[in-house]
Amino acid sequence: MPHAFLNKRNEPILVAPLDERHEDGLARMYLAYEPRNSFWGLPPIQDDACRQWVEGMIADGVNLLALSFDAGVVGHAGLFPMDEGACEMLVVVSPRFQNQGIGTQLARCAVQVSHEIGFCRIWLSIEANNLRARHVFRKCGFEYLAQQDPTGVEMAMEVCGYHGPSDLPVSEIMTREVLTVYQEMPCRAAIKIFLSQPVGALPVVDGHDKVIGIVSQTDLILPANANKRVRDIMTRRVVTVEQRCPVTKVIGLFNARRIRCIPVLDEREKLVGVVGRKDILAYYHEHL
């Protein structure tokens, strides 16, 4: 925390814990919610009742906000303690900002926070016809409970079995044997590497192993590019991370930038590895 990402409109969104500065903004989000009384009778229709409901959530729960730089508070996730180490989760996104990936990011951050706090189980209830919310929670790892009401469904996640990457440094999961190219290399030589090796992008390095660009398979799709040199088509503004960077930040970069792989540098800014989405999935497969 905080966690920044780009929504599906490429607008920056920040997920952060609720603080006093944004309490009024949270209340305004629910007061402006249309239609009121739309999910399990919430938000309350009467303004006073709505404000009291928000104040109760602030007092009783652990609250995360999704913040837009233009619109302020656009989403809310709350964790509310129950008996025996369990908590109830609520995730709400302002109607104007729904279907943009904000609810998924809020839910994932809330699961991570509940794990760090020490909750053993997360429970939630949603209306049966809210297919979008059901899809989001299933994607985040929630399972349906056995008995369901025709009007609503209950879902739960066993947090004790959830082990997020926490502060694991990216050096623990990165690929150390990195294929690289030089800026003067003909693109035809880069094409041969892509055809013979299972890689989606190649870092471009100088004579001191410092990253000066990156070239992907997509860069070489145009026929005219085959006769150029790597320097002519490479992306020069490269997203990189230092080898001590936590994996959670790398995941955030993948979500926000929609890139295939990220070069990993040492303290001298020299290339020591590369991390891709498959490296993270391999870690999950081995440890979760």
Image: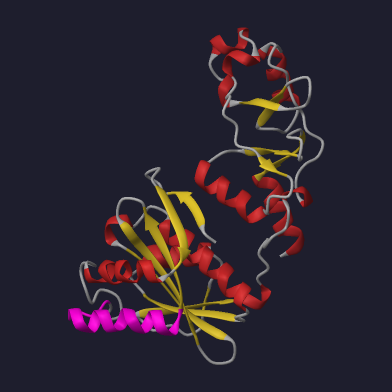
Question: At x 61% / y 52%, what residue is drawn?
Answer: 249
Left or right of 139, for residue 284 = right
Q: Is residue 277 left or right of residue 197?
A: left
Residue at the right extreme?
177
> Coloured how?
secondary structure
Question: Quick check: can you spot residue 41?
Answer: no
Q: Which quadrant would residue 85 be assigned to in this image?
A: bottom right
Q: Residue at x 43, y 83 (%)?
A: 148
Counting labels gives: 0
Quadrant of the image containing the N terminus:
bottom right
Q: Is 46 contained in the magenta span?
A: yes
In the image, residue 259 lies at what x, y percent?
A: 57, 38
Main structural element of the magenta stretch: helix, strand or loop? helix
Residue 277 position within the rendered picture, expressed as x and y whole percent measured from the top left: 64, 46
At 60% from the left and 36% from the top, the residue drawn is 239
Quadrant location, the C terminus:
bottom right
The residue under the point 70% across, 33% down is 199
User: Residue 44 in magenta?
Assistant: yes
Note whether 4 is above or below 131 in the view shown.
above
Find residue 75 and report its image quarter: bottom left
Magenta region, residue range: 43-61
Instruction: Report the front residue among 237 and 175.
Output: 237
Q: Nearer the viewer, residue 57 or 130?
A: 57
Residue farthest along the top direction in this orientation: 227
Residue 71 seen from this side: yes
Furthest-bottom residue in this view = 83
Q: Based on the displayed image, in which of its 4 quarters is residue 49 positioned?
A: bottom left
- Whether 32 is drawn above or below 254: the answer is below
Q: Residue furthest left?
A: 46
